[in-house]
Image (cartoon, rainbow, N blue to C red):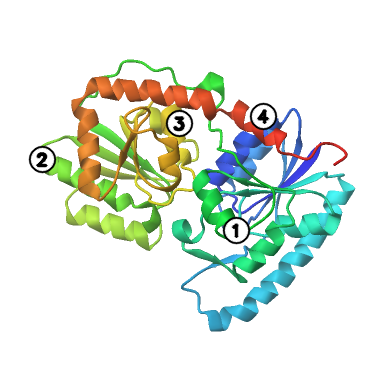
Amino acid sequence: MKILTVTHLSTLYGANRSLLNLIQGTKGTLDWIVICRGYKYENPSLKSELKEMGVKCYNIPYRLDVHARSSKLIKTKAFFVLEFIYNFIIASMIAVFAILNRVKIIHSNSSCMCLGAYISFIIRKPHVWHFREFLYDDYRLEYNFGVKYLRYWANKSFKIIAISKAIHQACIVDRNISANTTILYNGVVHEKDVTTVSLVKMKPPVRLLIMGVLDETKNQIDAIKAVDLLISEGYEIVLNVAGGKSGPYFNFLEDYVYSRNLQDSVVFTGYIPSPRKLFEESDIVLVCSKNEGMGRVTLESMAFGTPVIGYDAAGTSELINHMENGLLYLGDFESLADKILMLIKDPSLYHSLLIGGQKSILTKYTVEKYAENFLSNLPRRGD
């Protein structure tokens, strides 16, 4: 059965890595066609991965249906209308393509665009819509035409998939969306690829990792300040900060590192498209965002044999059972530093979290379980 999916980026950040896992897990059942929102200046890493998998992929420069609140609305309101007209023309062309290719299902990989909903409306095929982000809380984005506009198109969906209970509450229930909805956590690794747990003793320097887009909402500054505090107390620590090295927040973090003379202890690695090795070379992974939709990094840390410490909020709280498969913290960098010290000083706790994390992955978060549950939420042939 042919399925056409629309994704909002051409790079391999969390949503698209989850899409790749989904395609890998369902490829024997579904014939995927991927529409990327691609521009010449963007990193085409998703398209490269899809080509290696033998999946058809097309880069089309459509517009998202969201904007930053800082936009000058007097100038942009009319522009939003022009963007809608532009997107609907593109949707019409993709719709013709979908009809010619006998596509049976339309899938959208993010809630920040309505292009998939338009295509579904034009060709009268069921639309399955993944809601993966809060938008404002995690990216400071708002819908161009407001929540009512999103609700109109969302309610036309065959099924909406929320990637966590937190996303379901904030993005479906609180927005009064009445479409058929399910909660489906992402799968992050094949069962055979889960790292085998072994008894490991940390040696100085302790290697920490924080991974994700360098943005204020990801709160990398807490990790850096925690490292600063621990170094001042005599601990040898190196923090790898993985994410694209550009933008005002990167400049802010870099300035802080130099002002505290931490350049030998805090390493900005840049964007890492295949991060498994970085996880496996780390002793502890930190997730400091207070608004994770689900928290793919949290699960990858468990899957690749590295204990994770996460902020006790939103999707992260759903994934981490404190003292069982990871540690949760509340408050600021001092609380985070305390949790890091717990793992440095307690090898038995460290090892028990490794075992608990692996058990969690194999029970709920493999690609196989992800694919099976996704397929069960698709329309049956003839629906």
Front: mark 4 or 3: 4
**Circle 1/circle 3 CB separation < 8 Å:** no
Figure check: 256 above or below 266: below
Q: Dividing the picture into quarters, in which one does residue 251 lie? A: bottom left
* Distance Cα–Cα, label 1 vs label 3: 28 Å
| Left or right placement of residue 20 versus residue 342 in this view | right
Dot 3 falls on a residue whose secondary structure is helix
If you read the primary sequence from the N terminus, does the residue marked by circle 1 or circle 2 appear first?
A: 1
Q: Where is residue 368 in the image (x, y as percent from the top left)?
A: 62, 26
Figure check: 366 above or below 19: above
Are there few (<14), some (14-19), or many (20+) residues within 10 Å of tag 2? few
Q: Dividing the picture into quarters, in which one does residue 310 lie? A: top left
Residue found 62% across the figure and 62% down from its top: 64
If you read the primary sequence from the N terminus, does the residue marked by circle 4 or circle 3 appear first?
A: 3
Determine which residue is flagged by label 2.
233
Figure check: 36 above or below 31: below
If you read the primary sequence from the N terminus, does the residue marked by circle 2 or circle 3 appear first?
A: 2
Are there few (<14), some (14-19), or many (20+) residues within 10 Å of tag 4? few
| Left or right placement of residue 178 versus residue 286 in this view | right
Front: mark 4 or 2: 4
Determine which residue is flagged by label 4.
372
* Distance Cα–Cα, label 1 vs label 2: 44 Å
Of residues 252 and 373, which is closer to you in this image?
373
Circle 2: residue type: Glu
If you read the primary sequence from the N terminus, does the residue marked by circle 4 or circle 2 appear first?
A: 2
Residue 215 seen from this side: no
Dot 1 falls on a residue whose secondary structure is loop
User: What label does residue 112 carry, if any?
Assistant: 1
